[in-house]
Image: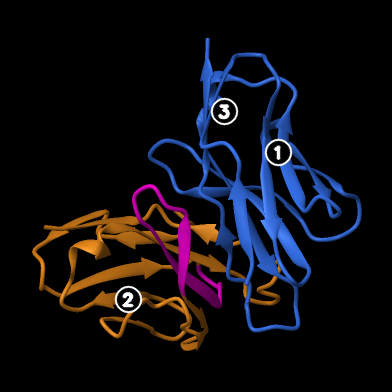
Amino acid sequence: AQSVTQLDSQVPVFEEAPVELRCNYSSSVSVYLFWYVQYPNQGLQLLLKYLSGSTLVKGINGFEAEFNKSQTSFHLRKPSVHISDTAEYFCAVTLRAGGTSYGKLTFGQGTILTVHP
Amino acid sequence: GAGVSQSPSNKVTEKGKDVELRCDPISGHTALYWYRQRLGQGLEFLIYFQGNSAPDKSGLPSDRFSAERTGESVSTLTIQRTQQEDSAVYLCASSLGDYPFTDTQYFGPGTRLTVL
């Protein structure tokens, strides 16, 4: 079975500072990787996903993530955050084709990013 | 609105009562998922629909939980004889379904269930 660990439950940063939200996964088979964001009082929204190809993936709102197969990590980064980036961020994986996962997502526990002025 | 909608947004019930949660997916999306998020925990998969069949029910925690879907439209999640541990936010997501492994899942706002 696969699992996802988000190493920080809360990350406080100041506006315009860089941020990295860490995600590690464990799986016996290859996976696809996702980052979702949940803004206050809103539903989950896809930020970016890694399917194949370049290990550096760019998403919406200036976020990017890098897939590192040897370290089984998929850390999310932004060079300069805004107040509006305050939200909860979820890392997730799904198994690649060949099994019976049907795309069901396995999520990490979430990281609350709080951007202070 | 063209997004996934869920109703009710909040539901408070007494232990032992049955509840029904509704999900309206994005039109044309054949794949539909239910997840739940209990306080302090990550989202857990419950069930997957492709059309009106459910090839993966592996996440349903007990036989008190059931779900159905009408065609490629509305889905209802029913919890019978609710228990306090059922308190959670129940999320529904839909995707195109052409290739569910990589299709983007679009999430609804969730139903917050509180069992007293």
Q: Tell me: residue B105, above or below residue B19.
A: above
- Residue that numbered label 2 is attached to: B76
Please name the color used to draw chain B.
orange
Toward the viewer: A48 or A28? Answer: A28
Q: Is disc 1 surrounded by few (<14), some (14 to 19) or many (20+) residues within 10 Å? A: many
Q: Chain of mark 2?
A: B
Q: Chain of mark 3?
A: A
- Residue that numbered label 3 is attached to: A85
Q: Is residue B104 at all visible to an observer of this figure?
A: no
Q: Residue furthest top?
A: A117
- Residue that numbered label 1 is attached to: A76
Residue A36 spot, x, y in % from top left: 59, 48
Quadrant for the N terminus of chain A in the image: bottom right
Residue at 77%, 53% in the rendered image: A72
Q: Which chain is blue?
A: A
Q: Answer yes or no: are tags 3 and 2 on the same subunit.
A: no
Dot 1: element: strand
Marks 1 and 2 sit apart, C-alpha to C-alpha, by: 35 Å
Q: Tell me: residue A30, above or below residue A21.
A: below
Q: Is residue B17 at all visible to an observer of this figure?
A: yes
Dot 2: element: strand
Q: Quadrant of residue A21?
A: top right
Q: Quadrant of residue A51?
A: bottom right
Q: Amino acid at mark 2?
A: Thr
Q: Amino acid at mark 1?
A: Leu
Q: Tell me: residue A68, above or below residue A104.
A: above
